[in-house]
Image (cartoon, rainbow, N blue to C red):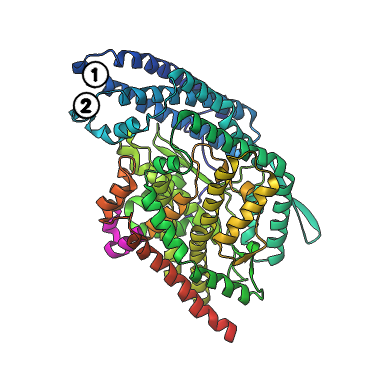
Amino acid sequence: MKEEVYLKEWNLTTVFKGGSDSPQLVELMEKMQNEIQQLSEEINYLSLSKNHFIEKMIERFLRGLGHIQLTLSQVTSFITCLLAENPKEKKAVALQGKNASVKAAYSSVLHRFQQFLSSMEQTSWNELLETESLKKYRFILSEWRENANSPLSTETENVISDLMVDGYHAWSDLYRSIVNNLRVTIELNGTKKEYSVGQATNLRSSPDKEVREKAFLALEKNWTNQEETMSRIINHITGFRLQTDKSRGTLTGLQKPLRDNRITEETLQAMWKIVTRHKQPFVDYLDLKAKLAGNDQMPSYDFWAPFRENSTSIGYQEAVEFILQQFHQFGPELESFARSAFEKGWIEAANRPDKAAVAFCAGFSLTDESRVFLTYDGSMTSILTLAHELGHAFHNEAMKSADPLNRQYGMTTAETASTFTEMIVLDAAIKQTESADEKLSLLDEKIKRSVMNFMNLHSRFLFEERLYETRKEGMVAADQLNEMMQDALTEGYAGSISDLPIHSWISTPHFYITSSPFYNFPYTFGYLFSVSLYAKALEEGKEFEQRYLALLRDTGKMTVEELAMKHLGEDITQEGFWEKGMALCVKDAEDFIRVSSLKLVT
């Protein structure tokens, strides 16, 4: 029987032939611009239409918005993929700038429509929502009406949208361009070699302590050299957001990201309280690992080190087969989807220096496809990253049957889907191994994810929260940003880590994502929420897959509180829900400590 071979490089030609020279892409972008202009003109007629015509006009308008949304997603994802596989692709950079202008025009039209909805008299509004043809849009229409709270004129809003293209969003583009083109020089065994940031970051999982430390120091040196530039970028991103929020009189600080993620502050605070309350078991875990390695405290560059020094590299083909086997155990649809993704060339996993640093999943809504991007290096971390991004892709797959305007979901539920598939693979690996040492090593890998979500992500949240408060007083210097990051890391890790990566404010790309401020708490939410989902999956077996798919499909048309109540029967505004998930994570740490402590004695 011929061995199945899974390619490490993706195929983008099925989306648009010709890459950045694709005439189909250019034609689609021009068509999208015309459709946006047409919708802009239609808004004028909406305010003049009679009540018995308005429902049909709104329904047609919403179909137009939905189509543009799918097209915009298609184009944006394609350009993102082009720049990921080759950050120096000049034509792709030009396309990115043009697409940003299209996005701004779409945002302007959407804002005008939101203002129209907010101007409707309450009785007319209630009648509109009861219209049979518009019932499926109730959630998104209500959300838009509520969000239309800017006191600025449409003309001023349009100016702000235009400024964001070459101002606010441009800073994010500049950050990505700098990082993607950086090269990290590391000397190993007397030989110097250049790595991309992604490759150098992957060396944190090396079984060789010298390699890990040298990679860490080389990266920190690079980040130090970039301090002044990056401090300006993060200051301008933060400052622009503060100024526009102030001008608009809109939600500020954390309020907007909470709204965008469809989560209440009550839920967020309940989650963080549980996280803060239960850090000690993870501090004990880190302290024990440090002692096992002969250290008083764990250096940050040792955190991702494999628990066993003789851990072997896992080939890509073997990794893919293992993932597919575990997805099969969960349910046929997940396995079938993932197998199709590998066979169709949706995965870019090659380990080469001339590609972007950050793993991601890009959705192509118009053609119902996805693409997964990562740098696979044979470590368990890489396998789990692959499973994580496939979880995002499966979420996209689940949303295919949803109306285009009901496909938009918050990062909280996005990270739930990705973490869930990651958990399936890791838990299966722990259960299947017969080696006690290997089982302990995999359990260690699992607990690392708890530490990341409960300590590292908490530190990112604390830093970003304090950054916005400090930025209100003026520009924040690079050395002050270093101090703020160090304080946040110390608090987040409860003082359990040494050699802190104080330049995490540079190396963490999430701080520079202009579309999603505070892209930190969604990971912790997704992690703990998926723990509860996974527990139910274990109880119900393969029958759970259909319930899981139903939950994913609902993520675009309800809040996370409503989602949890409908599909889990849980009130996530209460600490009790988060306690149940945390108890399972704490048990992992306690089990590891109990077994590993014997190594200190023997």
Count of numbered circles in the view: 2
Q: Where is residue 511 drawn, in percent x and y? A: 56, 44
**Secondary structure beneath label 1:** helix
Q: Residues within 10 Å of mark 2 (few under 14, many from 20)?
A: some
Between the C-alphas of marks 2 and 1, the distance is 9 Å
Per the rendering, the mark at residue 54 is 1
Q: Residue at x 70, y 48 (%)?
A: 479
Q: Is residue 535 magenta?
A: yes
Q: Residue at x 69, y 45 (%)?
A: 478
Q: Which residue is mark 2?
A: 128
Q: Residue at x 56, y 33 (%)?
A: 240
Describe residue 37's horizontal placement relative to residue 100 as left or right. left
Q: Residue furthest bottom?
A: 602
Per the rendering, the mark at residue 472 is none
Q: Which residues are magenta?
A: 532-545
Instruction: Tell whether label 1 touches label 2 (CB within 8 Å).
Output: yes
Q: Is residue 170 above or below residue 193?
A: above
